[in-house]
Image (cartoon, coloured by chain):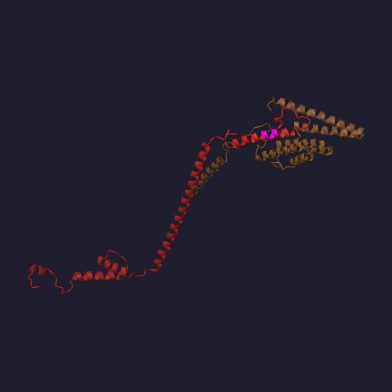
Chain colours: A red, B brown
């Protein structure tokens, strides 16, 4: 062999490679063959068969049963549609709540400042009215119109100026 | 779950809308006082504005133009200036402005006086009538117009008398006296009204 001397007890315990298969080895071989021939995916019956099947299927997967395939596709479609609908409704609700919240906050701010704003003050504006009070004395029988329009225009000009100041908030 | 979501949705929307309405209502509230108060003796008058003032200013200008023309002996020119005044566009059409009405009444009175001087008594009478349409209440303006109308009748009586139309002249004098009586009645009403207000006006 390798020219070295081995202990006699070690050489005796190793089976010879060309020795015929033992009864135990034949049983295990038959079990592996049966497991490999059986297409049903029952795991655990033979670890060696499971490993071999996994390797083989990963390299060349078998076609699945058409009925089963149809059922899987149907389930996937239903589930997908359900999830899409749920997601869409969720988005609509979130957007609506968001917009409502923004509008409510904006309105609240506006409302707050209006409530807190100064109370309306009745503006005293000079209004159109008879010019009679400008002439305590009775009119002369003739003439005086030019002097009267002077007085009227000046008085109402002052009123207009006051109204402008009032509108500007200056009193 | 679905019902709760929809209910919440509507509740929040309703809340937001009601807040917006409340805020908008508040925002429309007159701030700083847009509500005009009364600063005069005629409740509900239009606030004196640029339009009213523009008319008064233009009327004043026409009167002064008439003054200048009168002083220079241009009686027709003075009449023309006042004729332009009474045909001016008035402010706030459809809503008579007291000042405008009174200024027009007074302008018609002056126009009638000028026509009397121009010996155009019929036209003077028409101007007085046109002026009275602008002064229906018992004021000095109405009183003055009636006074001018009395003067028109007084002058008419003189003309008729000179023409030998004694009866017609008598009738004209009677109308003049009646008008002067009416004037006195109006002046008394104006004085009573003024005293009734405690002289405040």
Residue sitting at x 43%, y 60%:
A80
Q: Nearer the viewer, residue B139 or B108?
A: B108
Q: Position of residue B65 (x, y in %)?
A: 73, 39
Q: Quadrant of residue B179?
A: top right
Query: Is residue A151 on the magenta stretch?
Result: yes
What main secondary structure does the magenta stretch of the protein show? helix
- Is residue B186 found left or right of A88 in the rendered image? right
- Is residue B200 found left or right of B167 in the rendered image? left
All told, the count of numbered labels is 0
| Residue at the front extreme of this rendering | B72
Q: Nearer the viewer, residue B79 or B21?
A: B79
Q: Which residues are magenta?
A: A150-154
Q: Position of residue A167 (x, y in %)?
A: 59, 37
Residue sitting at x 79%, y 40%:
B76
Q: Quadrant of residue B54?
A: top right
Q: If the image is split into quadrants, where does the C terminus of chain A sit?
A: top right
Q: Nearer the viewer, residue B184 or B44?
A: B184
Q: If the image is split into quadrants, where does the N terminus of chain A sit?
A: bottom left
Q: Nearer the viewer, residue A109 or A13?
A: A109
- Is residue B58 found left or right of B171 in the rendered image? left
Residue B54 visible to an observer of this rendering = yes
Query: Is residue A96 on the magenta stretch?
Result: no
Residue B134 visible to an observer of this rendering = no
Against A25, residue B113 (above or below) is above
Against B163, residue A103 (above or below) is below
- Is residue B31 found left or right of B53 in the rendered image? left
Q: Position of residue B145 (x, y in %)?
A: 78, 33
Q: Position of residue A111 (x, y in %)?
A: 52, 40
């Amino acid at each position: 062999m390798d020219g070295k001397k081995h202990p006699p007890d070690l050489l005796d315990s190793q089976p010879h490679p060309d020795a015929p298969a033992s009864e135990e080895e034949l049983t295990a071989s038959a079990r592996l063959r049966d497991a490999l021939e059986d297409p049903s995916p029952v795991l655990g019956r033979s670890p060696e068969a499971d490993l071999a099947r996994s390797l083989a299927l990963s390299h060349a997967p078998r076609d699945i049963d058409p009925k089963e395939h149809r059922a899987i596709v149907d389930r996937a479609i239903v589930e997908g549609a359900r999830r899409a609908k749920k997601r869409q409704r969720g988005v609509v609700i979130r957007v609506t709540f968001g917009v409502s919240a923004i509008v409510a906050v904006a309105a609240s701010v506006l409302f707050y400042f209006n409530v807190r704003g100064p109370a309306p003050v009745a503006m005293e504006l000079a209004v159109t009215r008879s010019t009679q009070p400008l002439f305590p004395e009775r009119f002369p029988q003739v003439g005086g119109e030019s002097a009267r329009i002077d007085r009227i225009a000046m008085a109402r000009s002052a009123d207009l100026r006051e109204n402008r100041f009032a509108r500007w908030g200056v009193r | 779950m679905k019902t709760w979501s929809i209910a919440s949705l509507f509740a929040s929307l309703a809340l937001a809308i009601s807040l917006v309405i409340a805020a908008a209502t508040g925002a429309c509230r007159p701030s700083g006082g847009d509500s005009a108060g009364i600063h005069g003796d005629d409740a509900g008058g239009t606030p004196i504005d640029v339009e009213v003032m523009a008319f008064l200013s233009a009327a004043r200008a026409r009167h002064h133009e008439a003054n200048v023309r009168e002083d220079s002996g241009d009686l027709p020119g003075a009449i023309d200036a006042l004729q332009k005044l009474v045909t001016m566009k008035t402010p706030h059409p459809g809503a008579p402005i007291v000042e405008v009405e009174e200024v027009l009444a007074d302008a018609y009175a002056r126009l009638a006086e000028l026509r009397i001087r121009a010996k155009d008594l019929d036209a003077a009478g028409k101007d007085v009538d046109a002026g009275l349409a602008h002064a229906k209440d018992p004021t000095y303006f109405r009183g003055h117009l009636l006074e001018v109308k009395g003067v028109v009748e007084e002058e008419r009586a003189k003309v008729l008398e000179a023409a030998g139309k004694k009866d017609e002249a008598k009738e004209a004098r009677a109308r003049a006296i009646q008008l002067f009586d009416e004037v006195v009645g109006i002046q008394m009403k104006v004085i009573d009204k003024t005293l009734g207000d405690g002289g405040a006006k």
